[in-house]
Structures are given as C-alpha cells and as structure tokens.
Amino acid sequence: AQTVTQSQPEMSVQEAETVTLSCTYDTSESDYYLFWYKQPPSRQMILVIRQEAYKQQNATENRFSVNFQKAAKSFSLKISDSQLGDAAMYFCAYPKGNNDMRFGAGTRLTVKP
Amino acid sequence: DVKVTQSSRYLVKRTGEKVFLECVQDMDHENMFWYRQDPGLGLRLIYFSYDVKMKEKGDIPEGYSVSREKKERFSLILESASTNQTSMYLCASSFGGGKNIQYFGAGTRLSVL
C-alpha cells in the first residue's frame, strides 16, 4: 500500500504567482519528519524543506513553506513568487522506520513566463 | 557540500548482460540507498545499506543485488539484465536514518535492449 500520496501529477503556475502542491501520508507514529524534494530536469534531487511533526509551526525556507495538518495527515508545499527555476518534479517523502524513505509519485510543476 | 557521484549518466546494455552501477559519497555517511524511478511510481527502494557489508532489501529487490565493501561506495548489480529493468536509477546517502536528509546522485538512465 502506498504510504505517501500526491494527487496532482502535473501543475502549472504563472511566473510570480503562488502554487500549492498537495501531499497526504499514512502513519500511526506520533513523532516523525516529512520532506519535500525537488528534481529539476536532468539534475539531481535536492531537499526543499523538512517538517518535524511534533512542531506545530509550519516550516519555511524563503519562498517555500508548508501547510502541515497533522490530524489530517496532510503536508502541502506552497511556492510563493514562482520563478522559472522552480520548474521541476516535486516529491513528498516520509521516513518509514529508521532507514526507509517512502516517496510519493511526484508532481511535475511547470512555470509559465 | 555533500557529493554523491554515480559513475554513469547513461548506459545501454543488452538483455542478459551483467550490469554494475556504482555510487560514491564523500561525506562519511553510514546509510546508502539505491532507488528506481519510473513515471507515475515515484521512487521505489531497491536496497539500502547501513554499514559496510550490511544490506537490507527494499520494496523491489528482485533481479538486483548490492555490494558495499567500503563505506563510501555502494554498488548495484543486475545479474542478468532484462528489458523491464530499463529505468532511472538513483543513489542516495544519509547520516543515519529517519529524520536525516538524503543526498542524491545525478542518476543513471539505464536502457536494456
């Protein structure tokens, strides 16, 4: 069974606008971390942002922020002031167990000039 | 900066060939991972290693084996390549598991003809 679900295979946004990518996950744990990774075309995957589940405050990294709803098991990524360089595949990820990271199917973000 | 290097960006092999994919990291990370990335399926874990000579199966280990003789190097082996192993292969490393960020290589796109 898939642990992490990204329901939007593709999204597009106009340059300078805001876009939100959705992610839901399934866990019975109370203390865990959640991640968003970005994979630009033909380039390696890098971390965008990390959220600690026991922290109520949503994580923020410059133009990237999350909306973490623990009870709903929802972890969406908001990109503000979108730039052409934000075009990429975005993966939501959740560590299952001590070593195993589960990834969603990904959302391909297109940024229109 | 953490560097994870995969030996080849592109490989073309014949059915039945033995294929080696090499990955090297320079940050003394304990954990190393091999993922397979397919459209619509996200990243699926093939194998991971938490120490030299130690390995654990991921979700899709069939048809693959791994080797970790040195801490910095983790090899993925396709004993007898088949066309359904045509895919993008990503290597990653991390310091510990769970909450720790995984750092990825650029990927190897393997075509089996």
Image: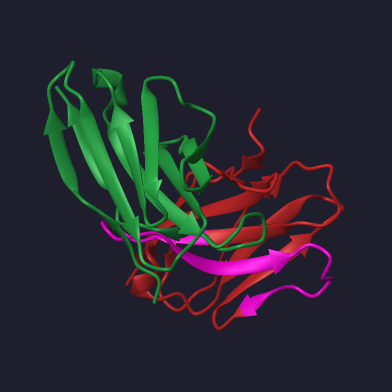
* Colour-to-chain, red: A
Q: Colour of chain B?
A: green
Q: Is residue A84 left or right of residue A55?
A: left
In the rendered view, tell whether residue B46 sits above or below residue A45: above
Residue A25: quarter of image: top right
The reply to whether residue A109 is in sight is: no
Residue A89 seen in the figure: yes
Q: Is residue B49 left or right of residue A25?
A: left
Q: Could you tell me which residue is drawn at 45 percent across and 79 percent down?
A: A16
Q: Where is residue A109, by image quadrant?
A: bottom left
Provide the residue span drawn in magenta. Answer: A37-60
Q: From the viewer's side, name the closer residue of A68 and B102.
A: B102
Q: Residue at the location (16% across, 21% down)?
A: B17
Residue B56 is situated, as x and y percent measured from the top left of the image, at 54, 34
Q: Quadrant of the N terminus of chain B?
A: bottom left
A58 is within the stretch colored magenta: yes
Q: Which residue is located at x 42 percent, y 55 percent? A: B71
